């Protein structure tokens, strides 16, 4: 069940604009603010992993919230 939460479309698009990522499609269920930030996750794993490269997305393409996505679980 999908219900309104703490993340709005404005928050999601503002965050993406701040980091310079273009989003095509996608819904709030995949909004970046819903996830832990990668630097925090890597810091928690310090000493157990060696980070060789960190990639930064430029464009993200996803099915919109009301579109049929044949690859969605």
Image: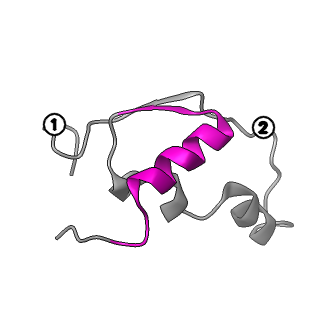
- Picture coordinates of residue 45 (x, y %)? 76, 67
Q: Is residue 20 above or below residue 37?
A: above
Instruction: Report how far apart the C-alphas of labels 2 and 1 lie in the structure.
Output: 31 Å
Point out the image quarter for the N terminus: bottom left
Q: What residue is disc 1 on? A: 70
User: Sequence order check: which comes first, mark 2 or mark 1?
Assistant: 2
Please give the range of residues in magenta.
Answer: 5-24
- Picture coordinates of residue 73 (x, y %)? 21, 52
Question: What residue lies at 16% left-to-right and 38% top-to-bottom?
Answer: 67
- Picture coordinates of residue 10 (x, y %)? 45, 52
Indicate the secondary structure of the residue bearing disc 2. Answer: loop
- Residue 46's image quarter? bottom right
Indicate the secondary structure of the residue bearing disc 1. Answer: loop
Question: Which residue is at the front of the view, 42 or 19?
Answer: 19
- Picture coordinates of residue 6 (x, y %)? 42, 72
- Residue 64's image quarter? top left
Q: What residue is disc 2 on? A: 53
Q: Is residue 17 above or below residue 41?
A: above
Q: Is residue 3 above or below residue 56?
A: below
Mark 1, residues whose alpha carbon is within 10 Å: few (<14), some, or many (≥20)?
few
> Residue 19 lies in magenta, yes or no?
yes
Q: How is the image coloured?
A: one colour
């Amino acid at each position: 069940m999908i219900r309104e939460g703490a993340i709005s479309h404005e928050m999601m698009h503002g965050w993406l604009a701040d980091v310079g990522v273009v989003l095509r499609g996608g819904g709030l269920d995949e909004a970046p603010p819903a996830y832990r930030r990668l630097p925090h996750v890597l810091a928690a794993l310090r000493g157990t992993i060696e980070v060789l490269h960190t990639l930064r997305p430029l464009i993200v393409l996803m099915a919109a919230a009301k579109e049929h996505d044949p690859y969605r679980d």
